[in-house]
Image (cartoon, coloured by chain):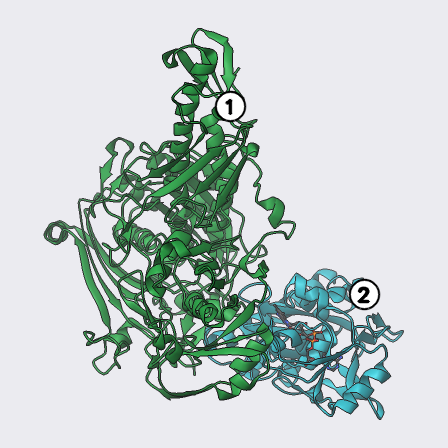
Amino acid sequence: MYPSRFDYDAPSSIGEAVAILDRSGGEAKVMAGGQSLIPMLKLRFASPERIVDINNIPGLDYHRLDADGTLRIGALCRHEDLEFSETLAESHPTLYAAAAVVADPIVRTRGTFVGSVCHADPQGDWAATMIALDGRIVAVGPNGRREIPMKDFVLGPFTNALAYNEIAVEAVIPPAKGKARGGYLKLERRIGDFATASVAVALDMDGDVVRRAGCALAGVGGKTIDANAAISVLNGKPLTPDNIEAAADAVAAAADPRTDHRGSAAYKRQIVKTFVSRILTSVARTEQKAA
Amino acid sequence: MALDELKIGGMGASRRRVEDNRFIRGKGRYVDDIVLPGMLHMEILRSPVAHARIKSIDTSAAWEVPGVRLVITGDTMASRNLAWMPTLSYDTQAVMATDKVRFQGQEVAAVIADDPYIAKDACSKIVVEYEQLPPIVNPFQAQSPDAPLIRDDKETQTSNKIFDWEIGDKAATDRAFEEADVVSKLELHYPRSHPSPLETCGSIADYDRATGKLTVYMTTQAPHIIRAAVAMVAELPEQMIRIVSPDLGGGFGNKVPVYPGYVISILASILTERPVKWIEDRSGNLISTGFGRDVYLQGEMALRKDGKILGVRMHTISDHGAFYADAQPTKFKIGLMHSAFAAYDIPAAHLTSEGWYTNKAPGGVAYRCSFRVTEAMFFQERMIHAAANDLGMDQAEFRKVNLVKDDMFPYRTAFGFLTDSGQYGKCLDVALEAIGYSTFKQEQEEARKRGKLLGLGISTMTEPLGAGNSREYDIIGIKMFDSAELRVHMTGKAILRTGAKTQGQGHETTWAQIVAHELGIPADDIVVEEGDTDTAPFGMGTYASRSTPVAGAAVAMVSRKIRAKARKIAAHLLEVSEEDIEWELGRFYVRGNNERGVTIQDCALAAYSNVPDGMEPGLENNAYYDPPNLTWPFAAYLCKVEIDPQTGVWDVLNFVAVDDCGVRINPMIVEGQIMGGLTEAYAMASMQYITFDEEGNCIGSNFMDYLLPTSWETPGFELHEVVTPCPHHPIGAKGVGECATVGGPAAFVNAVMNALEHTGVRNVDMPLMPNRVYEALQTGQDVSGAPPVKGE
Ligand SMILES: Cc1cc2nc3c(=O)[nH]c(=O)nc-3n(C[C@H](O)[C@H](O)[C@H](O)COP(=O)(O)OP(=O)(O)OC[C@H]3O[C@@H](n4cnc5c(N)ncnc54)[C@H](O)[C@@H]3O)c2cc1C
């Protein structure tokens, strides 16, 4: 690989990293797992003057639950950490399901959750889960910390709300109001392929009634599709076949796919519908069994 | 006592691959591992557009970049008469564009610099002004009366057509169709795919002005032909050219042609008087080098009610890209397409073909395809599938009626090939039994209750491997024999060289096994070397599954020459006449007295220390082998799939492969070849293709778009064998490298089509991506995959 010339820093604290970014006046790029940045450098789609590698900063490779159930994912938590996380397996079905289908096993050892959300790829998996779960990003810049709700974080394809001198240090996912249920389904042509279409569904259940339903889609629009409004038809309702069908239709309508070599817009919409309905049906079945 | 052949690593031993010792340690020596003193680095600037006139090229900013030593454009090449070169199909191909660019990715300029980073930086500083022309991405656009003329460089060219060609007996075929009870028809597109060896192409050209010698380290499957080609193109004396093909990271046909990059690096070295290294990047490899397939196949079959095939008509329309640069026997314009239906007893056949220029990369006939045999066999098995359905006959039964029977060999096919041997029916029976054919219908019913569609597909085929006998085959006039040279050293160890060139097939392991079989020298005592034209005997290289059928036969023949001389030496050592000498593996003994003998090693020592009067010392020889015929392996591939009708996603439940490739030298390696081939077959059937949009942009220019299956999605394969020794090969072996890639795809596709049978759909073009399968299910219509891709 022959990228353009760049300078390289590997600071050992967030303060130092932010200072370098600030000095570089927008010509530097943060590198976390490098699994999106390095391909961009290789193709010379990105030619930053400086790379600020945050991998030497201690204390960022965590994911943990607060006492109230808030999930915090540090900037160096790798996809693989989530894939094999016992915490997630029990508490966060949507994230846990997604972790196994992000990229391939090799990429998952390096790529980070936060880096993926920052990358804001319309086909990226994690941003979709973050929107469905109503998460937020914690950013640190020269003026201190701020929290950015996910709905304001992804501005467009490959564009996020961070200022050039800010680093995302943590992703925060609020606790479920009730039982957390949900899932993630992805249609890919091969392991390591980005989504032709994928669906993240997160439900807060109160008995057999949906208290809050969240949903977002990847691969079927110019940016990650926020389908929270569409799936809110389920709010306050049980997961009956009719309600599931209505929700699947509403979400499919919110998709904005294009016809390309992966399939027609109609096909991708159909996949979205099928996946929403499969996730909801499977939740309904498990709830029934439990009851 | 004779040696135990398996213990010395002879025939039939699943000996571990000796080359893997270095490969798995990361100690392979590929072109890019070679560093020469003073070496410069070359980067090629490629056209971003598919069809455009070049108005101007400004290289001044590139020359200014510190570390740049040379910038080459089409004009530089033209000034040396190197802007164009001949192709292996008697066409011409641009080495570097001078007038027009004719496909996306065509070579437009090159920068030679102190390191590859600088070369790449400087490339981006070259300004090319293009005047865009309408791009043509399929042969049907090429035929349109207002299509632009792609090859306006050729004085005699007035349209985009390259050739018309035909073979077979038209009159007899017409008669067959008149007599038919049922006529079955099928049309399909076999999409463009790419061999994608993990190592891309590259070269290091090292021209030494003092000696006048040009050494080129090159990723080539056929170094000796390249030497001849370079001598002709660069007008250098052949003895002053040395081509070295070091370890190759896969070839699959991609490394047969002469690529512009090689030629440019040679000129760059001549001009700079320094070694120049060129290593192609992944996209360069995918968008500009030898692809496979891209053929439209149409056919019909004349059938009698009882299931007998009376005749076949085929018409093919092939898309050759901007230059007709196939490597194939010169007699056959569309390669060995007429090997189609060779496994079946069909009285009459007629094939017509047309070839067209388009604005796509040139150089088809690659990818384990043995001169278009892949397309031929794919069409054959898809047509057989359709015909059985049209007759309402069971797929296996229909094949059994029509497959050539064991007692019919040698069998002359309707297109004129002579197939040598086989037990086709037995192979099919083994496969049917293994997959549980008899209970499949029931399984299918049960699956339907679960909401799943099950399908079972069969592909049975023979193919012509081992190009080829010199009566029929040549490449640019050079006969397609091959060679081996064996030197037995004083201590009974040996070095063997052949004119073939291994790229992962394991020649270093298997050639030694053939020698071990013939001479009883343990395989571990034999070093195999290939790929250096200064040391190896002349040969045509490795492709078309030809190494074992041709070079492998030469290895056996040279070993026999060595044995003949050793026998004379043995007689001398044992003080008996030659007629009284008997051979058993590894030693000669006196007839009637097995105790009194000498080993082959004793003879080797004597060859250098104690030869009989009048005999030349030494124990070495060579053999050139011109095969009497092609070898005809057979395979039965059966596949069972399950489709999820709501998404079109299909999974392989079971895949059974029964291969008869004659005698197996190293069963483990044979199985590896079959597994690899089936994986490629699965790739083409399910995900892998190169397509183009309306602008002529190549979709599939990187591994995120051009999909190679990983171990994750590749299904398991259940392998079985049947052995019918090749009657005309010295050790009874047939080619096997390509069988699975050639015969595999139809098994997957037929399985999916079988699952879709209730919809009335006759064909879905490969790759059978879920969206295509879903579309077929929804609409009940055939799904075409031909470019341009649908967009918005
Ligand atoms: C072969 C392959 C297949 C893939 N398949 C998928 C897939 O199927 N689904 C999917 O979702 N992803 C896929 N990816 C992308 C992968 O998930 C990446 O890991 C992820 O997108 C980016 O995370 P990273 O840590 O590697 O970020 P990097 O590559 O290091 O950075 C990506 C971008 O985010 C910025 N950034 C990173 N971290 C921070 C931070 N803490 N603060 C501010 N900015 C930051 C960088 O500056 C850069 O612009 C694939 C990647 C590869 C190579």
Residue named by callout 2: A87
Quarter of the rendered image showing ligand 1:
bottom right
Percent position (x, y) of residue B168?
Answer: 17, 51
Task: Give me the residue at 31% from left, 67% from top.
Answer: B320
Mark 2: which amino acid? Thr
Cα–Cα span, label 2 and label 1: 78 Å
Report which quarter residue B225 is drawn in.
Answer: bottom left
Pick the residue in front: B254 or A150.
Answer: B254
Q: Picture quarter containing residue B776?
A: bottom left
Chain colored green: B
Q: Is residue B211 above or below residue B781?
A: above
**Which residue shows up at 27% across the image and 58% down it?**
B334
Residue reaching furthest to the right: A67
Furthest residue toward top: B592
The answer to whether any part of residue B788 appears in the image is no
Q: Examine the rendering and report whether any part of residue B132 can be seen.
A: yes
Q: Position of residue B617 (x, y in %)?
A: 44, 27
User: In the visual, does A86 lie left or right of B542?
Assistant: right
Residue B783 spot, x, y in % from top left? 36, 67
Is label 1 within 8 A of ligand 1 (CB to nearest ligand atom)?
no
List the residue tagged with mark 1: B609
Q: Which chain is cyan?
A: A
Front residue of B237/A273: it is B237
Which class describes the residues within 10 Å of circle 1: few (<14), some (14-19), or many (20+)?
Answer: few
Q: Residue furthest front?
A: B210
